[in-house]
């Protein structure tokens, strides 16, 4: 049973896993939440790259056939590097500016993301390639991923509501979720944005792409490991499973030695 290996700084990348298991229920997945080193979005790119490399190697040691960098910040820091070094397919996240630019009617697209993602060369390249004919308003969201990570609904409302309002005040009608954590609270962000605004989450496209490029896709459990506290993760997954029942079956372990 060879799993698909997925990682993020924390629980955000589970938004990709949920889509993967929706497309192909029963797929063997091994997921690493690097909670001892979160948030990635507020760390320097070298640190995040080193973490990404160590985690990808631990997933390969566990037999992963494919690596999914289910984190925009880690993709910005390490995707090219991992693709050069690893012999398996590596799928990553890119802010979904291309579909947003195709869909906007106001001609103004918003992006919510971490500082690390917005500062990286990859983001400027995506805007340059896919959004020449529209305006792109980027809003960095300090604290939002961390609030989602700890399940702090009030902070999500205060921060998320504020960041979304900054974008809608600028006339955006399409908002790209440029951090996988935000996908876990997409319904709330959509409520703050109001009915005229569409949210674009790249998780479904990344899940589809993963199943296309994986050399084999086996059946097996969803195993979630953490470099942090497994008991805390268990509580958090329990709450998330109310909205995403597929997470209720996850086996939770401590990630050792990574
Ligand atoms: N989920 C991550 C992302 O997509 C990062 C959140 C963080 O650790 O700052 O960027």
Image (cartoon, rainbow, N blue to C red):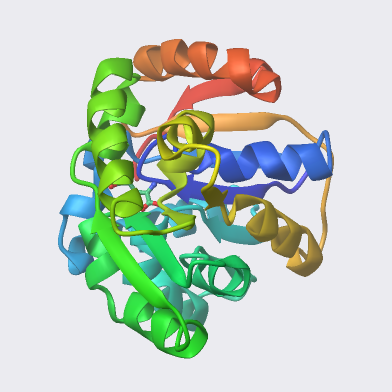
Q: Nearer the viewer, residue 131 or 197?
A: 197
Task: Relative to 165, say whether 73 is above or below.
Answer: below
Which residue occupies the foreground of this view, 8 or 180?
180
Give the residue drawn at x 70%, y 60%. 210
Q: Position of residue 142 (x, y in %)?
A: 18, 45
**Residue 65 appearing in the image:** no
Q: In the figure, is residue 206 to the left or right of 59? A: right
Q: Is residue 28 left or right of residue 148?
A: right
Q: Looking at the figure, which quarter contains the N terminus?
A: top right
Query: Above or below — where is 239 with respect to 195?
Result: above
Q: Position of residue 173 (x, y in %)?
A: 48, 56
Pick whichever, 3 or 128, lies toward us.
Answer: 128
Horizontal and vertical percent position of residue 100: 55, 66
Count all numbered tags in the image, as a single digit: 0
Q: In the picture, residue 124 is in which quadrant?
A: bottom left
Task: Tell me if residue 7 can be seen.
Answer: yes
Figure quadrant of residue 116: bottom left
Above or below for 43 versus 235: below
- Residue beneath the point at 41% across and 34% down: 255
Residue 152 in the image: state x and y as whole percent: 29, 18
> What residue is shown at x 35% (from left), y 50% (from top)?
168
Quarter of the image with the C terminus is top left
């Amino acid at each position: 049973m060879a799993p698909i290996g997925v990682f993020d700084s924390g629980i955000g990348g589970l938004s990709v896993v949920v889509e993967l298991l929706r497309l192909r229920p029963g797929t063997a997945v091994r997921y690493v939440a690097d909670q001892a080193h979160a948030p990635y979005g507020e760390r320097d790119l070298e640190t995040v790259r080193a973490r990404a490399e160590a985690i990808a190697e631990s997933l390969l040691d566990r037999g992963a056939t494919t690596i999914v960098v289910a984190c925009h910040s880690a993709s910005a820091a390490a995707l090219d590097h991992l693709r050069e070094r690893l012999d398996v397919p590596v799928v990553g996240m890119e802010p979904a500016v291309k579909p947003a630019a195709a869909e906007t009617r106001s001609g103004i697209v918003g992006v919510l993301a971490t500082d690390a993602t917005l500062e990286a060369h990859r983001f400027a390249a995506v805007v340059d390639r896919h959004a020449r004919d529209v305006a792109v308003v980027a809003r960095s969201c300090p604290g939002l991923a961390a609030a989602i990570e700890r399940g702090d609904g009030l902070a999500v409302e205060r921060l998320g509501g504020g960041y979304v309002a900054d974008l809608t005040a600028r006339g955006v009608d399409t908002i790209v979720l440029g951090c996988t954590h935000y996908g876990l609270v997409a319904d709330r962000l959509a409520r703050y944005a109001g009915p005229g605004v569409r949210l674009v989450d790249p998780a479904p496209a990344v899940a589809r792409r993963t199943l296309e490029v994986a050399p084999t896709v086996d059946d097996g459990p969803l195993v979630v490991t953490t470099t942090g506290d497994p008991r805390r993760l268990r509580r958090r997954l329990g709450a998330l499973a109310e909205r995403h029942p597929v997470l209720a079956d996850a086996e939770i372990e401590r990630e050792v030695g990574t």
